[in-house]
Image: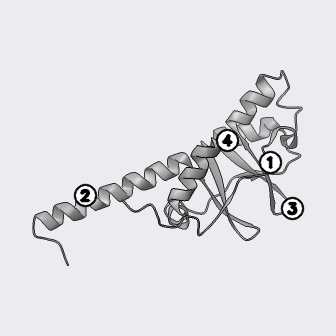
Amino acid sequence: MRTSEPIRAILRMKGPELFSLPPDASVYDAIALMSEKSAGALLVMDHGLLAGIISERDYARKVILMGKSSRETAIREIMSFPVIRVSLEETVDECMRIMTARRIRHLPVVDGERVAGIVSIGDIVKWIITRQEETIQQLESYIAGAYPG
């Protein structure tokens, strides 16, 4: 199982769609967008630059448990920053290590200052399962004598 491929391989499989809000948007708006898009986290973008990340975990710990109002609290008050991020060339292995060590579920991927995408732990698991299925199919073809090589 090769997980030494760059994280850009997962972004190609996942597609380019990104969900974000500015830091002055309300936490309520963030939770509504996460719900609409079935996302566990959103990028917080300020004038085209990555300013932070807001996740369901941030909401639970910094709004609900603190007794704040999601409609009156700005994202900037609860977002996580500085943002742990990786480059397009970082390996899948290294991204898994970072996510495990830092106990995060979402990892923005950048190309210089530009956000290229975001990967979740679920995206990585899906990618690994897909690669394992491909390997199994290749081995079955080889054993059956139908391997093209």
At 72% from the left edge and 38% from the top edge, which residue is drawn?
A: 32
Sequence order check, earlier mark of 2 and 1: 1
At 31% from the left edge and 61% from the top edge, which residue is drawn?
A: 134
Sequence order check, earlier mark of 3 and 1: 3
Query: For the residues carrying marks 1 and 4, which lies nearer the camera in this image?
Result: 1
Horizontally, is 101 left or right of 142 in the view? right
Sequence order check, earlier mark of 1 and 4: 4
- Residue 59 coordinates in the image, percent (x, y): 74, 32
Q: Quadrant of the N terminus?
A: bottom left
Q: Around disc 2, counting alpha carbons within 10 Å, would you say few (fewer than 14), some (14 to 19), or many (20 or more)?
A: few
Pick the residue in front: 26 or 89: 89
User: Which residue carries the number 2 mark?
Assistant: 136
Q: Around disc 3, counting alpha carbons within 10 Å, would you say few (fewer than 14), some (14 to 19), or many (20 or more)?
A: few
Q: Quadrant of the C terminus?
A: bottom left
Label 4 – label 2 distance at C-alpha:
35 Å
Q: Around disc 1, counting alpha carbons within 10 Å, would you say few (fewer than 14), some (14 to 19), or many (20 or more)?
A: few
User: Which residue carries the number 4 mark?
Assistant: 34
Q: Amino acid at mark 4?
A: Met
Q: Is residue 68 above or below residue 54?
A: above
- Residue 91 coordinates in the image, percent (x, y): 53, 63
User: Which residue carries the number 3 mark?
Assistant: 47
Query: For the residues carrying marks 4 and 2, which lies nearer the camera in this image?
Result: 2
Query: For the residues carrying marks 3 and 1, which lies nearer the camera in this image?
Result: 1
Element type where label 2 sits in the image: helix
Horizontally, is 32 left or right of 26 in the view? left
User: Which residue carries the number 1 mark?
Assistant: 81
Element type where label 1 sits in the image: loop
Q: Amino acid at mark 3?
A: His
Q: Amino acid at mark 2?
A: Ile
Element type where label 3 sits in the image: loop
